[in-house]
């Protein structure tokens, strides 16, 4: 046992235990509905759009959103809001309006399978393996974050906390599949807001309100765009071009439009309109997320001036746990801990369900056992869930070696999502792009990120964030150039094979006659107007 910074009472433990029991019961209750592989892996494509929208966002509300973003707010200032705004909203709208018709219409069961349809088996295989590796590493981050909370707030050992958290996710995902994960993610979303929003208000009151906060932290941490003309002029140490190209374009679009973790939620929607609206509706909620993380991180600069030292946990990820221990009394502490655990379980369950689908369909069925019954693949999915979680326990210890969860995750995105976005962008807009062009582009882009990460000295870039942004850009650029060059020397697919996979090939998608509040194009426009408005306000 470690030494807790707070000592919860019986009522706090009761709230946590009730939550654990509830999420397990949801999985057990849905077990009888998991009769086919499509039920388990894609929820039978039957989930209402408002539920998939919340689940879409909630699956992303893992360790990076809670501990990582609050830590980045402390390190980099108000510019951290770019991860939610510039680094999310345009890409989420783009996914809903332009890309979901391809994903949902192709009836692909996963992003790697879509790559097989558009490119070839080699491209699908490479992406399936790299995505499986990434999701397991990401799952480890959520396990580490859950264990950190249990250790710091409750005094439990890291090892026991990691194993307990893994077992709970194993039960409710392994039994109830994606449906259990989605419905739990909706519950977890509301728990996160109820349990963590009081920290924002209490911290703001303590520092003298918004004006008091802005006047008491360093000037270079109070803006989102001012000071980005040079790397030295802002808290993130990155100039505007690196911010726009690295985060706003490559990392953002690379994650939100190609990562099967979030795309899987939209693919579970009941129809095409619901699937397209899923990321767009989620973008409205995404704009509000800095309230829960960035603002507490800014306030912690004043309230916890020695954060990052050994006496305060040794890393910046302790922002929320320390503020929670500072402000929450008995009862509210239990709710706050439950909210954090809910966010981490949501993120981990999202990664596990995505890993399970890709492993079963894109690796096991494609290369190991091609002709088997649907019942067999359903069994393999449950087995893969257990295997993925066991491996995640090991990767949790890798996450411990990084001073910030956000830096670790953005490093992974630069390796895997940045080159993948280049392949998608070319493949969906240029029918001359070939299967081998896609494969070699993806391979070279990934290798470029690896060479830049391992080949350059650790202090080459002025900050970890700047390094992640620029590595992502060059990985994207390398993949983009190589795919085009290889495509000119290899044979493309026939137009008939590209129907529904490339713009301009096949029938144009028509929006059905819907009220304005259900039309993806109108909702997307409103979201972008709000996005521009908040950027002007925070300039």
Image (spheres, grey):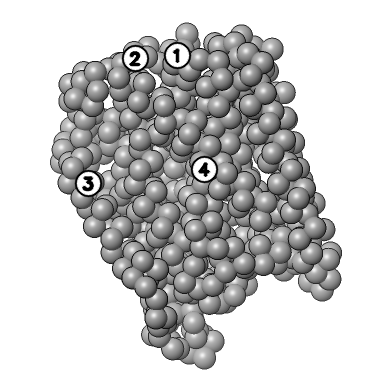
Return the disc, 1 or 3, that comes first in the chain's sequence: 1
From the image, tell me which residue sits under label 4.
Answer: 189
**CA–CA distance in space, label 1 to label 4:** 24 Å
Element on which disc 1 rests? helix
State whether residue 44 is above or below residue 392.
Answer: below
**CA–CA distance in space, label 2 to label 1:** 10 Å
Element on which disc 4 rests? helix
From the image, tell me which residue sits under label 1.
Answer: 326
Residue found at x 59% / y 63%: 47
**Residue 361: % across, % down:** 70, 65
Return the disc, 3 or 4, that comes first in the chain's sequence: 4
Res. 413 mark: none
Depth check, mark 3 against mark 4: the one in front is: 4
As rendered, which of 192 and 61 lies closer to the eye?
A: 192
From the image, tell me which residue sits under label 3.
Answer: 535
From the image, tell me which residue sits under label 2.
Answer: 303
Element on which disc 2 rests? helix
Depth check, mark 2 against mark 1: the one in front is: 1
State whether residue 398 is above or below residue 511.
Answer: above
Return the disc, 1 or 4, that comes first in the chain's sequence: 4
Return the disc, 2 or 4, that comes first in the chain's sequence: 4
Residue found at x 28% / y 37%: 79
State whether residue 99 is above or below residue 532.
Answer: below
Q: Quadrant of the N terminus?
A: top right
Q: Quadrant of residue 356?
A: bottom right
């Amino acid at each position: 046992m470690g030494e807790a910074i707070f000592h919860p009472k019986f009522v706090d433990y009761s709230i946590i235990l009730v939550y654990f029991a509830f999420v397990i019961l949801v999985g057990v209750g849905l077990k009888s509905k998991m009769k086919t592989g499509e039920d388990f892996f894609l929820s039978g494509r039957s989930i209402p759009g408002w539920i998939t929208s919340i689940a879409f966002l909630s699956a992303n509300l893992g360790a990076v959103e809670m501990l990582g973003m609050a830590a980045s707010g402390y390190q980099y200032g108000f510019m951290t809001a770019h991860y939610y705004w510039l680094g999310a909203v345009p890409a989420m709208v783009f996914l809903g309006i332009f890309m979901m018709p391809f994903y949902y219409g192709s009836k692909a069961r996963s992003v790697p399978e879509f790559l097989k349809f558009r490119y070839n088996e080699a491209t699908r295989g490479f992406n399936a393996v790299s995505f499986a590796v990434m999701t397991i590493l990401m799952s480890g981050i959520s396990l580490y974050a859950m264990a950190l909370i249990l250790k710091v707030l409750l005094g439990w050992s890291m090892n026991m906390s990691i194993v307990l958290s893994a077992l709970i996710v194993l039960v409710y995902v392994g039994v109830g599949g994606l449906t259990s994960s989605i419905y739990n993610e909706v519950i977890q979303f509301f728990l996160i807001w109820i349990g963590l929003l009081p920290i924002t208000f209490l911290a703001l009151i303590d520092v003298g309100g918004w004006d008091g906060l802005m006047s008491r932290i360093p000037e270079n941490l109070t803006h989102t765009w001012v000071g980005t003309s040079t790397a030295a002029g802002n808290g993130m140490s990155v100039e505007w071009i690196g911010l726009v190209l690295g985060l706003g374009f490559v990392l953002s679009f690379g994650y939100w439009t190609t990562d099967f973790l979030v795309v899987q939620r939209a693919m579970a929607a009941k129809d095409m309109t619901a699937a397209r609206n899923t990321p767009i509706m989620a973008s409205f909620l995404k704009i509000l997320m800095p309230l829960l993380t960035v603002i507490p991180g800014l306030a912690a600069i004043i309230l916890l001036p020695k954060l990052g030292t050994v006496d305060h946990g040794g890393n910046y990820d302790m922002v929320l746990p320390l503020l929670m221990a500072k402000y929450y009394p008995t009862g509210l502490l239990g709710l706050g801990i439950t909210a954090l655990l809910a966010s981490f379980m949501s993120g981990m369950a999202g990664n596990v369900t995505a890993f399970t689908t890709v492993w079963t369909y894109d690796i096991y069925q494609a290369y190991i056992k091609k002709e088997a019954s649907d019942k067999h693949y359903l069994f393999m999915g449950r087995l893969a869930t257990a295997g993925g979680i066991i491996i995640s326990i090991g990767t949790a210890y890798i996450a411990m070696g990084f001073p910030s969860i956000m830096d670790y995750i953005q490093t992974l995105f630069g390796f895997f999502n940045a080159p993948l976005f280049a392949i998608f962008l070319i493949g969906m807009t240029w029918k001359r792009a070939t299967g081998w062009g896609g494969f070699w582009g993806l391979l070279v882009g990934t290798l470029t990120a690896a060479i830049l990460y391992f080949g350059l000295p650790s202090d080459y870039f002025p900050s970890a964030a700047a390094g992640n942004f620029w590595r992502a850009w060059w990985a994207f650029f390398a993949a983009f150039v190589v795919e085009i060059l290889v495509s000119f020397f290899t044979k493309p697919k026939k137009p008939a094979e590209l129907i529904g996979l490339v713009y301009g090939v096949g029938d144009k998608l028509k929006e059905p006659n819907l009220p304005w509040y259900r039309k993806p194009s109108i909702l997307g426009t409103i979201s972008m107007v709000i996005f521009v408005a908040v950027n002007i306000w925070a300039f």
